[in-house]
Amino acid sequence: MAYTIAVLVGSLREASLNRKLITEMTKLAPDTLSFKFIEIADLPFYNEDLETDTPPAPWTRFRDEMKDVDGVLFATPEYNRSLPAAIKNALDVGSRPYGDSIWAGKPAGVVTASMGATGGFGANHHLRQALVFLDMPTLQQPEAYIGKVQDILTDDGVVDSSRDFLAGFMSQYAKWVETFKG
Ligand code: FNR
């Protein structure tokens, strides 16, 4: 049986290198995982005043889409040494109403990529801090801080020298999901 994994991308721009990278990584994953990209760009900023019987439609759409997935794979750039607001907002929206979080118990993987050398380390660890509180068991090794991401992406996929590492990450993530969902 394949597990359904939600993919959330922290960059909203169309030409996002993070989106391209994680798309290529899903192609390298074991077939025990199937992937569903869930969009976060249209989620209004979390505001408790809107948490009524009729919350904003994009919140409801997001919460419904996330409800039945088995795990969550995050792919995000680093913005100013932290995580982009869009991905933090998605975490906040999914964590409410109180007691009804969509996150708890879902095994997570975190991939960060940047055009610089540090590979989004700051975003990666700030994201992990929230995932601890949200009760998401998060793959620890291997870590995926992908620096100079523009150099490993090609028109056809990823360069040969990075393929084994990226496939290895997906293989470990698949085992991680199996640990919690098998
Ligand atoms: C960046 N970028 C960036 N890079 C980095 O390594 N550390 C950082 O703190 C930041 N800060 C930052 C802030 C803002 C507002 C922007 C727009 C960009 C560069 C960033 O990593 C680069 O643009 C990536 O290519 C963005 O990812 P996507 O959109 O290609 O997925």
Image (cartoon, rainbow, N blue to C red):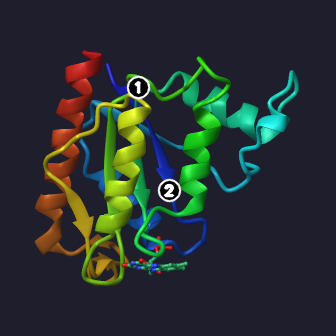
Look at the picture and state if 95 lies above or below 142. above
Q: Which residue is mark 2?
A: 9
Inter-mark Cα distance, 1 to 2 = 17 Å
The quarter of the picture where residue 148 lies is bottom left
Look at the picture and state if 121 lies above or below 175. below
Q: Residue at x 31, y 19 (%)?
A: 1
Q: Residue at x 17, y 31 (%)?
A: 175
Look at the picture and state if 148 lies above or below 111. below
**Which numbered dot is residue 106?**
none
Q: Residue at x 11, y 60 (%)?
A: 164
Indicate the position of residue 112 as horizontal and vertical percent values: 34, 63
Indicate the position of residue 93 as horizontal and vertical percent values: 65, 39
Disc 1 residue type?
Asp
Q: Is mark 2 within 8 Å of ligand 1?
A: yes
Q: Which residue is mark 1?
A: 70
The quarter of the picture where residue 58 lies is top right
* Left or right of 158, for residue 4: right
Mark 1 crowdedness (10 Å alpha carbons): few <14, some 14-19, many ≥20: many
Q: Earlier in the sequence, mark 1 or mark 2?
A: 2
Looking at the figure, which quarter contains the C terminus? top left
